[in-house]
Image: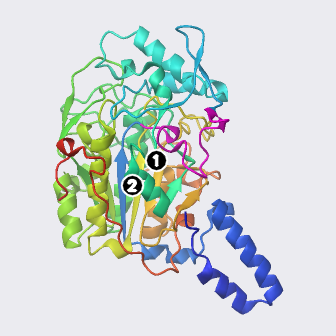
Amino acid sequence: MTDPPTNGLCSKIAHRLPWIVAAALVAAVAAAVVTGRFVGGGSASNPDDIHTIKHIVMIVQENRSFDSYFGTYPGADGIAIRDGQPIACAPDPRDGGCRRPFHDPTDSQGGGPHSAAAARTAINGGRMDGFVVASQKARDRCATAVDTKCAPGGARVMGYHDAREIPNYWKYAENFILQDRMFEPNASWSLPAHLFLVSGWSARCRRSGHPATCENALESPQHTFTPGGPHYAWTDLTYLLHKNEVSWGYYVEKGSEPDCRDDGATCPKVPQDAATPGVWNPLPRFDTVRDNRQLGNIQDLSSFFAAAKDGSLPAVSWVIPDDAHSEHPPATLSAGQAQVTREVNAVMRSPNWDSTAIFITWDDWGGFYDHVSPPRVDGNGYGLRVPGLVISPYAKRGFIDHQTLSFDAYLKFIEDDFLGGQRLDPANDGRPDPRRHVRENARILGDLRASFDFSQAPRPPMILPPDPLGHASKSPPDP
């Protein structure tokens, strides 16, 4: 693994200070870069250089914990191993024993429950040993495995993968940025997580067009999607982007979504496309999107590939999979990794590559084991740890970012880059709502600028094969 370059910053320091002081500062900076610990989220370049990034692409996959994908990644805060054996052991109520993390080579898993109750059980007061209990409780209540709370994971939620199953994700980590303290913003399931991703909040509203009628909703921002509602009346990020004439696009792959609409009822799969409001596509229900006549910005995934190809990516893009390519259990790892690789390759081949940052994450932990107890910032979370990757021509090489992060950090980066630091703050955004916290301002939240070195020459693309393990029958061709 190659350490991130520090010569640009170090030479500037050395040029201005006596050599003894310069040497000390160089050593300190080098140590900070190697460990990935930047106090206050500082960057190796001028903070104003964030504007080098003209395009931000957020690729959002589904239902994996950090330890389930990177728990054995060298240098990351992963699964503790002693004498070749994981130390942690999660109690199994079936036999009174316990189950340790283990390498799972299979391409498809059952996963586990990921409701707010399941999060509390899994975290278990910070002991992080309730994953098998949560999974087994769900199975005991289960009438059918279609129910997301009844995912047939069992003790397999303790399984983890590595470069043998997800080689491209590990190559992205080795060559760009791995974030080992990226937490789901809320301690529950997909819909609230996607609401936080676009608005920094999850709520229920009594009246359309009246943000003041909204109230916090950790678990159930709605019970069902009906033809006329519900409506999300609070302010989302697209409102500020539109107000400041910043382009955006939300790209949805046509297919289906696996989650029931309240994450608790038995249901068949629900059709999904850009025009269908859903668990992974909440923006059509936001008053701001409709009132600003921005529904056309929610497009099919094919439009993302077309925009990348001709160099017309918007300033801010969200990229959303369908069920088959989501990695949401039981969807396969190989199909999801292939889709993400195609999307990254499209950006790398794009004329926009030299001014783009790609953020890849997974919306919630999917019931899978993770050993890090989430910090508490408010009544919503944080939730459990999920993987996070940053890919950019200005990303440091092989850097592990140990800052505490959540999806709020994406909003913060976008606001700092395109909106002059304006926040989704009801006190000054022109649409007051009753949210109690401006999540982007949380003192514990890190700064994604620490992932970048804007003084370096733009790095060339790293095109990877979408199907490195030969699952060709499961992967469509690279566009």
Above or below: residue 296 compared with residue 397: above
User: Main SS type for the magenta part?
Assistant: loop
Q: Residues within 10 Å of mark 2 (few under 14, many from 20)?
A: many
Find out whether the residues at labels 1 and 2 contact each other: C-beta distance under 8 Å. yes
- Where residue 114 sits in the image (x, y, percent)? 44, 27
Q: Nearer the viewer, residue 105 or 108?
A: 105
Can the viewer see residue 426 in this picture?
Answer: no
* Magenta highlight on residue 73: yes
Above or below: residue 453 compared with residue 183: below
Q: Residues within 10 Å of mark 1 (few under 14, many from 20)?
A: many
Q: Give the Cα separation between the discs numbered 1 and 2.
A: 8 Å
Say left or right for 457 vs 356. Answer: right
* Magenta highlight on residue 382: no
Q: Which residue lies furthest to the right in this view?
A: 20
| Tag 2 residue | 237
Label annotation for residue 200: 1
Look at the image and give the residue range highlighted in magenta.
Answer: 64-85
Q: Nearer the viewer, residue 128 or 228?
A: 128
Indicate the amino acid at tag 1: Gly
Indicate the amino acid at tag 2: Leu
Q: Residue visible at 37% across and 17% down?
A: 150
Above or below: residue 344 compared with residue 16: above
Above or below: residue 136 compared with residue 118: above
Q: Residue visible at 28% across and 17% down?
A: 266
- Where residue 155 sits in the image (x, y, percent)? 48, 20
Q: Quadrant of the C terminus?
A: bottom left
Secondary structure state at the residue bearing disc 1: loop
